[in-house]
Amino acid sequence: MVINIYDTANDMSRQLVETQEYQGLKKALDELKADSEAFASFKKFQQMQAEAQQKQMKGQQPSEDEIKAIQTLAKEISGKQAVQNLMNQERQIDQMLQQLNKTITSPIQDLYSEIMPQSNENN
């Protein structure tokens, strides 16, 4: 019997949009978009962050001014309720994805369990 694990992954992708976590993230993003000022600042922050990451991938460092501008904007947007809600929803979906990853990769962990030292929580 041949198993196409990608079919299962595609099914999970379709099911993801039905989860409470995804729906909460979508709602939070919609609410952020409705706050035009917060959304514009959030998009600018995302752009600045992406540019800094691209520089780092090329082996360049962002300038001190660029870093300060990113930090200033991060502080500004983190005080906005719509951004806080989005960040909370992102954490929830991230937790779900981490648990899914742990579940999916458990057979691999099991393969290595006999050669990996077991942690002793009583130490």
Image: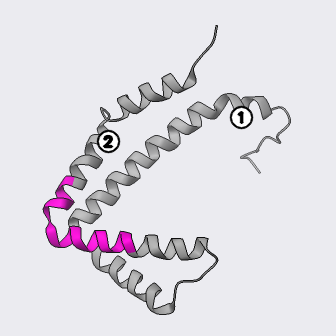
Which residue is the site of mark 1? Answer: 109
Q: Quadrant of residue 68?
A: bottom left
Q: Main secondary structure of the magenta part?
A: helix
Residue position marked by numbered label 2 in the rendering: 22
Measured as percent of width and height from the top left, residue 85 is found at 26, 58
Whole-angstrom CA distance, mark 2 to mark 1, is 28 Å
Q: Nearer the viewer, residue 84 or 59?
A: 59
Query: x%, y% of residue 56?
Result: 58, 75
Q: Which residues are magenta?
A: 30-47
Would you call the spot at circle 2 few (<14 residues within 10 Å), some (14-19), or many (20 or more)? some
Left or right: 120 as drawn, with respect to 47: right
- Label 1 Cα crowd, 10 Å radius (few <14 / some 14-19 / many 20+): few
Residue placed at 17% from the left, 56% from the top?
31
Residue drawn where x is 26% and y is 47% of the image: 26
In depth, the one of 20 and 18 nearer the eye is 18
Disc 1 secondary structure class: helix
Of residues 105 and 2, which is closer to you in this image? 2
Q: Residue furthest top?
A: 1
Horizontal placement of 121 versus 8: left or right? right
Residue flagged by tag 1: what amino acid is it? Gln
Give the structural element (helix, strand or loop) at label 2: helix
Residue 31 in view in this figure: yes
